Image (spheres, rainbow, N blue to C red):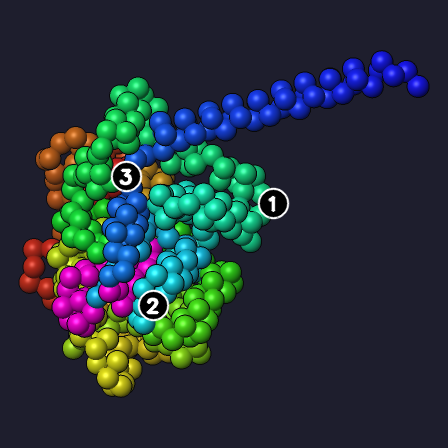
């Protein structure tokens, strides 16, 4: 055996090992620097979790979780005043049901909460998790926590059934690849100054989004009011499609129920109200699929309240209550929370509120109760020498709608009436050559005394 070879090999392997360790250390350092520079300092979730951690040892008896429909629908000052509760919201945009579970579990561990409210909508069960949202939530709840806590949380996400064995799992090691500020030097510089210069999370959010008003307890909202003219872009069926519920989301809901039951927590799953057109756009999917989630909750002994189906004696949304096609604005949230809190107080005293809601089995009764035109949208179809424009109304069962059509030029406010009121939803626009026109429609329920109930427009290019 050549004894001179072995030490040489050892030195070679040692150099390689040292080189590998140095490379890994440099990569880790680069990742930390990239996260400091590019990961946005101050998110809505970080504001909530920061305040939540500051309340250690204080009384929180009610935890609110869920996606942005929960985040924007429940005004906790109103809720506490109505229920006599001490609540906090760990809701967040696009929050998965897995993260809702984590939020409830954390509140049970820290504050021994006895009431949990999970805000959901149809998409909570028809859509899967969004990696960006899950990463943002993880960073917010792990900020300032011990290394072991952060490592366990990160491993839990990487090894979850959604991401284990996928490239996305490894991407979670690099947070800045999910959510980052603009790549320009000004945005990066501002982000770093905020992070290192003593700016609070809340101050950073307000600088980035001055229209968001934070009221505390994890709740903030906007004052904007929906523009129903843009209903077509706001349709859930356009954003998400008409899909049945996913089994994994129902399994996640079942785990939340099990968690609450095993810890003596009263769970209420509430479907926050949305504009009526975003219930109608699902067609028969809504009454066919929503009972699947309802059954999971009621089989576990908890309550499932769909406020889209609330009778008028309990709650009626005002048309100006909505921020967009999915969320309530600040005024709308205050109104809804009061109605929700009053009903929940009745439930908790043992009252049966089943009759306060329309049922999925009696769907036609709900459809017949809709007494206003929620929205109208336009679609186009090229033909021989014409472009056919068709209006789609979102109205109650048996409600007749009439339409009035105008045509104008793009970029001009001048329009010409081309067809007066008629129940025919279609209009044929004569075209020759190439060009573009803007077609406008006004719509109203037959018998309405209003100038119009809803309107929409479409750019026709030919």
Is 67 included in the stretch rendered in magenta? yes
On the image, numbered disc 2 is attached to which residue?
112
Whether residue 239 is visible here, answered yes or no, is no
In which quadrant is the N terminus drawn? top right
Up/down of 260 relative to 179, above or below: below
Identity of the residue drawn at 7% across and 55% down: 451
Secondary structure under tag 2 reads loop
Q: Nearer the viewer, residue 59 or 130?
A: 59
On the image, numbered disc 3 is attached to which residue?
42
- Disc nearer the start of the sequence (1/3): 3
- Give coordinates of residue 80: x percent, y percent: 17, 67
Is 163 included in the stretch rendered in magenta? no
Q: Is residue 56 left or right of residue 213?
A: right
CA gap between label 1 and label 3 equals: 31 Å
Whether residue 176 is visible here, answered yes or no, is yes
Identity of the residue drawn at 43% across and 36% down: 175
- Disc nearer the start of the sequence (1/2): 2
Q: Nearer the viewer, residue 82 or 422?
A: 82
CA gap between label 3 and label 2 equals: 28 Å
On the image, numbered disc 1 is attached to which residue?
165
Where residue 211 is drawn, which disc sits there? none
Q: Which residues are magenta?
A: 59-85
Q: Is residue 274 left or right of residue 332?
A: right
- Disc nearer the start of the sequence (3/2): 3
**Front label number (3 vs 2):** 2
Up/down of 89 relative to 346, above or below: above
- Give coordinates of residue 429: x percent, y percent: 25, 41
């Amino acid at each position: 055996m050549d004894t001179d070879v072995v030490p040489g090999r050892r030195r070679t392997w040692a150099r390689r090992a040292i080189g590998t360790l140095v490379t890994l250390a440099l990569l880790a350092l680069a990742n930390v620097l990239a996260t400091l520079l590019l990961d946005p300092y101050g998110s809505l979730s970080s504001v909530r979790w920061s305040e939540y951690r500051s309340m250690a040892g204080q009384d929180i008896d009610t935890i609110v979780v869920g996606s942005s429909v929960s985040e924007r629908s429940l005004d906790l000052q109103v809720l506490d005043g109505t229920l006599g509760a001490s609540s906090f919201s760990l809701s967040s945009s696009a929050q998965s049901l897995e993260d809702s579970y984590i939020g409830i579990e954390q509140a049970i561990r820290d504050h021994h909460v006895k009431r949990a409210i999970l805000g959901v909508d149809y998409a909570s069960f028809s859509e899967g998790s969004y990696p960006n949202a899950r990463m943002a939530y993880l960073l917010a709840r792990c900020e300032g926590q011990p290394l072991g806590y952060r490592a366990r949380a990160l491993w839990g996400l990487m090894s979850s059934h959604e991401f284990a064995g996928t490239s996305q799992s490894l991407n979670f090691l690099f947070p800045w690849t999910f959510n980052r500020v603009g790549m320009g030097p000004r945005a990066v510089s501002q982000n770093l100054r905020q992070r290192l210069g003593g700016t609070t999370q809340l101050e950073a959010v307000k600088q980035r989004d001055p229209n968001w008003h934070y009221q505390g307890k994890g709740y903030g909202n906007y004052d904007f009011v929906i523009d129903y003219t843009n209903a077509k872009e706001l349709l859930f069926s356009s954003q998400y499609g008409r899909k049945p519920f996913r089994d994994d989301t129902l399994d996640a809901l079942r785990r939340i129920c099990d968690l609450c039951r095993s810890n003596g927590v009263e769970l209420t799953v509430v479907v926050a109200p949305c504009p009526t057109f975003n219930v109608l756009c699902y067609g028969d999917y809504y009454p066919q699929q929503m009972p699947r989630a309802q059954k999971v909750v009621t089989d576990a002994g908890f309550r499932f309240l769909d406020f889209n189906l609330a009778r008028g004696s309990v709650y009626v949304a005002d048309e100006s209550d909505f921020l967009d096609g999915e969320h309530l604005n600040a005024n709308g949230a205050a109104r809804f929370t009061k109605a929700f809190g009053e009903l929940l107080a009745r439930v908790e005293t043992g009252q049966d509120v089943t009759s306060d809601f329309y049922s999925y089995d009696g769907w036609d009764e709900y459809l017949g109760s809709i007494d206003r035109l929620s929205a109208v949208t336009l679609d186009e179809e090229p033909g021989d020498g014409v472009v056919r424009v068709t209006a789609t109304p979102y109205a109650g069962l048996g409600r007749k709608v009439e339409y009035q059509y105008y045509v104008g030029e793009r970029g001009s406010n001048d329009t010409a009436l081309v067809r007066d009121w008629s129940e025919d939803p279609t209009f044929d626009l004569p075209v020759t050559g190439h060009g573009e026109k803007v077609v406008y429609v006004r719509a109203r329920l037959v018998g309405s005394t209003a100038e119009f109930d809803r309107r929409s427009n479409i750019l026709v290019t030919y």
